[in-house]
Image (cartoon, helix red, strand yellow):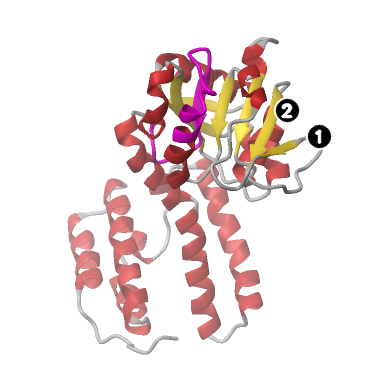
Amino acid sequence: MGGGIESAVAIIGPGRAGVGFALALLRAGYTVRLHGRRKRDVPKPLQLTVGPRDAPPPPAWLAQAGVVILAVRDDAIRPLAEALAGGGAIGREHVVLHLSGVQGQEALAPLVPSHAALGSIHPLQTISDPERAPERLRSAWAAVEGMPRAVEAAEAIARKLGMRPFTVAGKAKALYHAGAVFASNYFVVVEAVAQRLLRHAGLSDAQAWQALRPLVAGTLENLLYAEPQDALTGPVARGDDTTIRRHLESLTKDDALLYRALGRAALELAEKRGMDEATAARVADALATDLPLVLRRP
């Protein structure tokens, strides 16, 4: 993108993703305008314009932006697109993108009559602190989809921010995003389960997490240098069905269900890595056997 209207980006939605993306764009040399429904503090040098809380009219400066990014939650994308369409703020010269990982250009359907280029860009990265977003986004991958001109614009933005763009068909976005949730959100959940189990083994919450952190760091380091099936360790990978059974005997019903589900997924990796059929069958039997479970909830 050059120095004209194409380098001006409007972001509607000053949440963590919107602010983080805005800061990254500013650092990459874009002119950025940020708009929201209510006044809030944003990091300098960002400036926020606000509209009425209910059905805000499109800001007048929207016409000056070549790219408009809707950085709102998934269920707010279509209503916002409807509001923009109703206000006549979007024209054929615009590229309109949203940041949803699960929805495609269909979420922007109300803007089809405007003849704008519609699509999406989803950074495959977590943004918990907007001010760290420029560094976090650099080297992250970004899923893009939509109309050809929208894809072209999204890819250009991704590359300017140091990301690696790749295309995902709209109908495959839910599957793609579910994978991202497993990699990030559910990774956190699994660590929380591990922390709770260590707590019930006698450690405090703080001690449990301090004890687990080196293990988690070691696992992540292994994954930096190997694919998951090669980084897998533990009783399933070793074919240790006796340990698996003892684990299941110690767990509550809900935790045992989770352990079994993850254990079966681990067994698939172990089999891909070359586990022999007899060992795999023994492990599968241990994971499938109904054992007396502790029914109390810790």
Residue 286: x %, y % from top left? 24, 72
- Prevailing secondary structure class for the magenta stretch in the rendered image: loop
* Numbered circle sitting on residue 162: none
Residue topped by disc 1 = 45
Up/down of 294 relative to 260, above or below:
below
Describe the element under mark 1 as helix, strand or loop: loop
Mark 1 is on which residue type?
Answer: Pro
Up/down of 126 relative to 288, above or below:
above
Residues 121 and 92: in front is 92
Query: Is 84 in the magenta?
Result: yes
- Kindly indicate the quadrant of the structure image that contains residue 6: top right
Residue topped by disc 2 = 26
- Residue at x 26% of width, y 51% of height: 271
Up/down of 218 relative to 298, above or below:
above
The crowd level at tag 2 (other Cα within 10 Å; few <14, some 14-19, many 20+) is some
- Residue at x 52% of width, y 84% of height: 201
Residues at circles 2 and 1 in contact by the CB criterion of under 8 Å: yes
- Residue at x 44% of width, y 19% of height: 114
Mark 2 is on which residue type?
Answer: Leu
Marks 2, 1: nearer the viewer:
1
